[in-house]
Image (tube, rainbow, N blue to C red):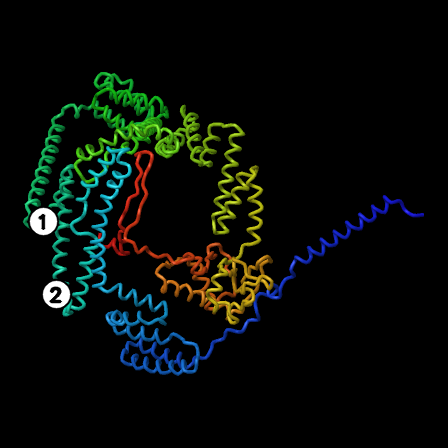
Amino acid sequence: MTGCPSSARGRRAVALLQACVAVALIAGCGTTRPPAPAELEPLAPARHAGDALPDDVERAAGRLAALALADLPDAAAQALGLLRDVDARRRADARAPTGLVDLAEETVRAIAGSGEQARRAPGLLERDTLDPALRRRAERALEREPLTVAERALRDHRQLRRGAIFNRLAAPLARAALGGGLNPIETGRSLLSSLLTLHHFPVASTRERRALRAYEAFLAREPAAPEAPRVREQVEELRARVTRHRHEAAVEAGERALGRGAWNAALLYAARAERIHPGDARNASLEQGALAGAATRDARIRAALRARADVAELRDPVRHALAVDMLVGTPGSLAARLDDPRVQGRTDPGARALLRAVVASATGRDAERIEALERAAGSGEPFARHATAVLRQPDQDPYGAYRRARSGERSARTRWLLLGRLARGASERDLPRPVEYLIDVPTFAVSLITLPLRALQYGRATRFMGAGVLAAGERYVRRHPDGAHSPRIHRDLERRYASAGLWASALEHGRARGAGERTLARYHALLADALLEVARRERRPEMRAAVYGSILSDHPDTPAAATARERLAALFDETSPQSIRLSREFLLEHPRIREVDTLALRPELLDGEARNGEVAEEGVMLIGRTWVRVSLEGREPVIRELPAANFALLAALLEESRYRALVADERESPEHDPQRDLFLERARLGLLDRADHRPAARSHAEFLSARERLGTVRARESVLPVEVVVRGDLETLGLSAVPRLRLPEPAADAFLYE
């Protein structure tokens, strides 16, 4: 009996479906590439990095180094000739150059003196085959020459002066050309301000003082040089300018001291000005003013002392006993004083109020103490100033300090809203204050026009004006945790901390004021999320583990706790005694490091062919002792151990690569990592028999290629001396494109001449 057609069609459909599944499985298996041999074993069999026997060039270089250390320049020069002959024979055999000849020449010139090295530098720089480290050393030798330093400093001084004048005038002129019609008042004020501030240039600038020091060093080293007469003229001119600058600075400082009544300081500045420029009339005038002010001050002090000695009331026994008891008395004796008829009849109400304040303070009644102090401060009697001084101290009246801080914050916010930049007062232009206020008068009109714009920015711009309120509020709640004003202050501080994103402090004050569970749970969640972000940015594993532990112990019911638990488990699995990374591009840039007697990394892992396996961007990681972890593209990392001798050579090559980068490229800067240096030093000495598991011994250094450290293209300064800067903001209603001259950067040692 044959089956029905429908059954046949069903069987055919099942067979077709099975065929599709089989094809899919075959295709899927075909797309999964089996691991290449290099991925199974990324390190080739290591060749022992034994101590190679020195050849003739190395022996000749060793003899020269020994003669140089013995300070025998003539013998070292003869050894240099021998080294050149040996190296020439080596190059004749088509063997790789060693570079020892250039280093030997530098050694011979170094023991001959710094002048010889500088004279030889121009010839070295003409050679195309010069080692980059030696080229940079020769350039630095020329840059450090005294005449070069002095001429460059004077050239920078002239360029800075011209550029500063041009840049000072360019901004208001450009504003007048582009936006003067919109805001003529502000444009005119800016132009006037720029013209008035041109007198700020010092008599002797930092660069001129640096040039003077370099000229003096040149004359001390080569007094008979052909350039010496010209240099002496420059030295005399610069010395006169520096002396004039120092004298004017001393006189101006003395006049400022006179203005604020610091007579002793004015006398010191007058004496300094006299030493710098004896016989100047301003010195005598400054000294006379200081002496007259000091005499007036002394006369007032003597008169005050005589007046105090004549006051009979100060010797009153009742008041004297009361004053002593207020200082050293017990709460019981002070309370008894309040009911003493002699105190009631022979003291002022302000004194009695101050006594009540002292009694209330001794017995812990703070509100009564503050009330008594306010009554004493408002009495207008001699004791009022003592009560006022106490009330002005934040520690004595924390709630009053909190109220004053809030009032000051409101005033600051209001001033900023109404006046904008003028809320800080007139700008400092080293001019008389009336003139500065007169210059800023037109800005008031602009401030009124831009008030709606500041209103829109009010919340963001005034967010950080309440630091004083936070400090005063914290002082009160810590001193009076159960005070009458504590709940309100806790609520205010909680709101302020929450708006600033400081969730730990907001949680603390919310808990202190008895906030609801939902509010506290939200703070816990936000704080845990913030801690997760802190842990993500932290490089040290022990610190990340501590942050994760804090989340799990303090915020266990938050969504971040589950994430912290997973990351903590992964951290324990991945943590190693060291974490020194050699990036893929670094390995490509330094082929000597991956050779068979060091890392022994198979070359096919860096040939760019994915079919035979490739090292991932993470590269190779030194993970402690002589173990390395090789990261592979699309594969699990492979961990292998290197022979101790090979690892020692690898550590030496890593240190050499960093040193050569520092001496060959001025863009490089030293990276301080004592843990890395200690680990590599121990590796070179063969002391890695035991891994150091201390968290303080772990290093997270990275050896990166030049492109990864400094960028794809080497940055070059523009050949144009002018740059265009676009300026403008809504507050001043101005927009301008300002041409500016490029100003020279200050020298690294400029702070020595300021």
Q: Amino acid at mark 1?
A: Glu
Instruction: Answer left or right for 89 relative to 10.
Output: left
Q: Is residue 401 something one can see in this rendering?
A: no
- Quadrant in which residue 460 is drawn: top left
Decide which of 255, 366 is in the foreground and name it. Answer: 255
Identify the element where label 1 is drawn. helix
Name the residue that disc number 1 marks.
274
Decide which of 697, 160 is in the foreground and name it. Answer: 160
Q: Amino acid at mark 2?
A: Pro
Where does the image place residue 346, in percent across and percent down from the top left?
A: 21, 18
Identify the element where label 2 is drawn. helix
Residue shown at 24% from the left, 44% from the top: 170
- Mark on residue 229? 2
Instruction: Answer left or right for 563 relative to 390.
Output: right
Q: Is residue 448 something one can see in this rendering?
A: yes
Where does the image place residue 116, in percent across and percent down from the top left?
A: 25, 72
